[in-house]
């Protein structure tokens, strides 16, 4: 891999330009209004894989958005790396909080990114991080330095729960056969603190609907005499946490893996400043489950958050109305051993059971996925660790992430292989938020580091 | 008034057609997008008063929408009736629940209105009820049967708190001088149970904003570690009622007028079927303050209702986000002796005081007004009672309404005269709701009854 560093420097501008083109397409999988753009993005990704040197590139139709499959097989006796990523992005709203349009990428310097960062929805999650792998492959094929076989599986429904990926994986186990799965869809602790994500939280995402009277009512004539669906929904949501911010759903914690004091002590060694954390979010205090630190609350502990709520009159001015219906979108982050389908059932039963008389409650599961933990003594982890040492000059820190990539546990189950999460983004990259961005330094560092993973993984295998 | 009944029958179709024209104009005062339509409605009302025989008709500019003033003075020594009404309407949303467009009036038969009802926003509240007075005047002037002086004051900001009416009344006390104020902006118990509203609830309407982190956050990376503004808002709203549905704001009940057991017994005599009430709303149970009946809860007791709530992702599909902000519109219905400005302050102080660390809370008062009670031994009440006896063949029942007409107490204070509330609508007319309508029978009965009020009020004075 002797020329990778110079190759990245020489092609820097082209790498940036190509990513910017990809970011211009609003591939919002959650909103059917962007169907054509999402499909257009799939085609663009397929083309880039052909150009990068794949022998086979297929746009595989599903019941939803297509999955791009590609491969370059150089020797059946050599190990095979399967790269997973996604080309769909989160909805950009609230649009008014973006300092530049989400689908008109611009490069701006930030405190953490003096070399500049690309601002656009999907810059980091996951177009930018997925594209690092395409460019890393381009280097290896161009220089005859691809040391093993490689397969790509890039989907377009990750942000809506990978609804069709499971079926695809089950039906294509031979095609997807591999020795290790490589994903860049997570972050690292800091630019000078490389880390490898060894744990992911599971997810259960539901939508609830509370119905009271059969029509909106005048709050003067009916106020105080009938159950107000919004007040009731607020009461029900409030009751889901106790005074210590423990979740009150019966059985919710039954299978939660409790870390040992030693493991928690290890975690606590990761560099973290509560002050700068609060300062970055502009809050005067953190908030969460009693008995756990901030880093534990968002990684090894399950959570319940309302992601959206609406009901009644939300327009300009005042309307004295009692709404007929109130809604909320609620997601629970789960830790290893919590089964998302079981948790979804527990939530549904509990939420319906606490509905007072005078209203009816409907709980609709959206999607979910299992949590995941990977051992740090696997060949894949060791190869990734050595790759970081090569390009960062530091041994990466194993880290539990609070995020969810539900399909990781599916991969292990169906493809019998471990996943290595090499993330190059930063928490401050604002993924899922307005002004999402990806540091150019991080982008190029990723492209530079990935080929070494292939090298060491092949050597260690 | 010997010809009123036949006059109403002979002109029935024209009365309906004229009202329908007025209902076609979307005079939504809460939404500035309808500014021109609201002003257009003011002009239409002014024209109708000229045609009905007023000597003077003025479109009085204010800082908001114009107030229509008109009068016909036949003899300074005779009493003067001041008619108040409003030409603005509530916003029609949710539009998808209307069975016909809110501003394309249609006549449909209903169980309660076999003679047909006009379906349109404002049909009952208040264009239809206001226009009854215009047509009643038309009859009296045409037949030389106007027994006293009459003044009209029709405003365009009732649905947004009559923000400019107070100033207008204070500045025009002489012009508005009167012996009694007559308003049709309430309902009656049933078509065969005429009633006169003797009490109104006050109102305090506020908007609250809860701000957590300075941007929307990824619920996986931050979930459980920072205060989620939506969860916090839900908790704060839930805490505003205790387990008996008493409002928990300190001092909230301090000035609440407690009715005697005798008064409550009198109230309980009004015909009411809890079963048909629940059936009409399609609910399995009523809900409210412990220790009070449904009719007490929505008339003699103060209430707190969330009229609208919003925050986070409310679009199609799922977005795993922790919102930076969450909002709610909250209104409190007040009973006589509760001062709305004091209550607004109590709410603001309490709501801000219960905000947990990690969020900031902003409370913005929208508008409000005082409650009101009128004695049943006044000349005005007696005249109204006799008018109903004339056209309904029944003595009307005095009734407390849960609704608010904040300016009624202002009138008493500034103009030193009592207000008589002769309402001809029904609770089921769905005012402030989709499919608002006004029974043609009620509309015509109102036009027929009103002239008798003038007759008896003049005789009794």
Image (cartoon, coloured by chain):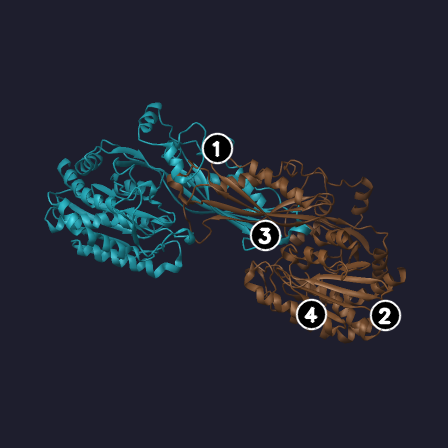
Chain colours: A brown, B cyan
What number is the disc on residue A46? 4
Same subunit, tags 1 and 3? yes
Q: CA distance from mark 4 to mark 2?
A: 25 Å
Query: On screen, B356 above or below B33?
Result: above
Which is nearer the eye, B25 or B174? Answer: B25
Same subunit, tags 2 and 1? no
**Mark 4 or mark 2: whose residue is earlier in sequence:** 2
Closer mark to the observer between disc 4 and disc 3: 4
Would you name the residue on which mark 3 appears?
A: B324
Name the image quarter holding the C terminus of chain A.
bottom right
**Mark 1 or mark 3: whose residue is earlier in sequence:** 1
Residue B171 shows in this picture: no
Query: On screen, B374 above or below B22?
Result: above
The number of numbered discs placed on residues in the rendered structure image is 4
Would you name the residue on which mark 1 appears?
A: B245
Would you name the residue on which mark 2 appears?
A: A1
Q: Residue at x 86, y 56 (%)?
A: A379
């Amino acid at each position: 891999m002797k020329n990778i560093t110079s190759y990245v420097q020489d092609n820097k501008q082209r790498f940036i330009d190509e990513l910017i083109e990809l970011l211009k397409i609003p591939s919002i999988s959650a909103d059917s209004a962007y169907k054509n753009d999402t499909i257009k993005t799939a085609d663009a990704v397929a083309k880039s894989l052909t150009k990068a040197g794949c022998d086979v590139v297929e746009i595989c139709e599903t019941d939803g958005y297509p999955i791009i499959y590609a491969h370059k097989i150089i020797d059946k006796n050599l190990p095979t790396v399967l790269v997973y990523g996604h080309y769909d992005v989160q909805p950009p709203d609230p649009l008014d909080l973006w300092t530049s349009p989400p689908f008109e990428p611009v490069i701006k310097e930030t405190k953490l990114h003096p070399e500049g960062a690309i601002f656009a929805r999907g810059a980091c999650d996951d177009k930018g991080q997925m594209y690092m792998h395409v460019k890393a492959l381009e280097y290896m094929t161009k220089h005859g330095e691809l040391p093993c076989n490689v397969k790509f599986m890039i989907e377009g429904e990750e942000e809506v729960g990978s609804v069709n990926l499971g079926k695809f994986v089950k039906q294509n186990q031979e095609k997807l056969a591999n020795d290790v799965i490589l994903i860049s869809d997570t972050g690292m602790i800091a630019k000078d603190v490389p880390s490898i994500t060894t744990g992911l939280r599971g997810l259960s995402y539901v939508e609830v609907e509370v119905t009271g009277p059969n029509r909106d009512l005048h709050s003067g004539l009916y106020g105080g005499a009938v159950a107000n669906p919004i007040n009731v929904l607020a009461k029900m949501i409030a009751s889901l946490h106790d005074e210590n911010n423990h979740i009150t759903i019966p059985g919710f914690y039954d299978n939660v893996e409790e870390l040992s004091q030693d493991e928690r002590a290890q975690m606590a060694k990761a560099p973290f400043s509560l002050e700068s954390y609060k300062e970055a979010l502009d809050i005067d205090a953190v908030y969460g489950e009693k008995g756990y630190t901030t880093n534990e609350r968002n990684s090894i502990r399950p959570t319940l958050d309302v992601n959206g709520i609406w009901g009644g009159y939300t327009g300009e001015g005042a309307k004295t109305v009692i709404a007929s219906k109130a809604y909320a979108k609620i997601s629970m982050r789960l830790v290893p051993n919590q089964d998302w389908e079981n948790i979804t059932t527990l939530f549904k039963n509990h939420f319906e059971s606490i509905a007072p008389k005078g209203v009816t409650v409907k709980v609709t599961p959206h999607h979910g996925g299992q949590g995941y933990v990977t051992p740090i003594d696997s060949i894949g982890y060791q190869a990734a660790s050595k790759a970081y040492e090569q390009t960062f000059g530091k041994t990466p820190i194993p880290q539990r992430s609070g995020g969810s990539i539900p399909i990781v546990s599916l991969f292990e189950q169906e493809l019998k292989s471990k996943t290595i999460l090499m993330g190059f983004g930063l928490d401050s990259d604002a993924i899922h938020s307005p002004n999402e961005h990806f540091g150019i330094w991080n982008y190029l560092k990723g492209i530079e580091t990935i080929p070494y993973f292939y090298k060491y993984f092949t050597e260690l295998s």
